Image: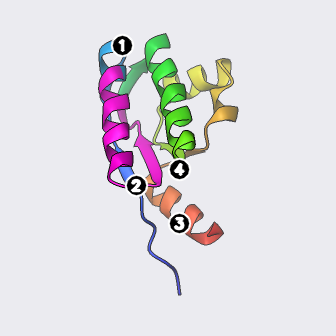
Amino acid sequence: MTSELNYEVVRPNGILDGTQAIQLRQEISQRLDKTAEIILIDLQEVTFIDSSGLGALVSALKMVRTRGGKLFICSINDQVRMLFELTSMDRVFKVFKDEYTFKNEFTAKN
């Protein structure tokens, strides 16, 4: 018997830059205010991340952890994956292939 996984998904799109970064942090904060403990950021529709976007992801991770939650990322493209590897963000964030894989792996561990 598996327990239902309770999480919120945030789906930014386009270029994750300074403007989108503000929106991303606000959306995650709102989800946390609704008592979400697990946030999954689905980057499937993100084509590029600049330094502001990367900073927003790190800031979001700190915000979620401060509130006792967990943050994960899924569905990154090759360009974003390369950026994560170059900046060692692949060691900071747990990245899943997609939302389906996240649900299966996370549910199996808990």
Report the residue marked by disc 2.
36
Residues at circles 1 and 4 in contact by the CB criterion of under 8 Å: no
Report the residue marked by disc 3.
104
The quadrant the C terminus occupies is bottom right
Q: Residues within 10 Å of mark 1 (few under 14, many from 20)?
A: some
The quarter of the picture where residue 82 lies is top right
For residue 15, say whether it is visible: no
For residue 47, say whether it is visible: yes
Q: Is mark 1 on a helix, strand or loop?
A: helix
Q: Is mark 3 on a helix, strand or loop?
A: helix
Q: Is residue 43 above or below residue 55?
A: below
Report the residue marked by disc 4.
69
Residue at (48% x, 44% y) in the render: 74
Q: Residues within 10 Å of mark 4 (few under 14, many from 20)?
A: some
Q: How is the image coloured?
A: rainbow
Residues at circles 2 and 3 in contact by the CB criterion of under 8 Å: no
- Indicate yes or no whether the magenta region holds residue 86: no
Q: Which amino acid does label 1 sit on?
A: Gly
Residue at (36% x, 38% y) in the render: 29
Q: Nearer the viewer, mark 1 or mark 4?
A: 4
Q: In this view, does 88 lie above or below 68?
A: above
Mark 1–mark 4 Cα distance, whole angstroms, equals 24 Å
Q: What residue type is labelled 2?
A: Ala
Q: Which of marks 2 and 3 is in front?
A: 2
Q: What residue type is labelled 3?
A: Asn
Asked whether, in this view, residue 101 is left or right of residue 17, the answer is right
What is the span of residues highlighted in magenta in the rendered image?
Answer: 22-45
Residue at (63% x, 27% y) in the render: 89
Q: Which mark is residue 18?
A: 1
Reading the chain from its start, which is encountered first: label 2 or label 4? 2
Q: Nearer the viewer, mark 3 or mark 4?
A: 4
Q: Is residue 22 above or below residue 109?
A: above
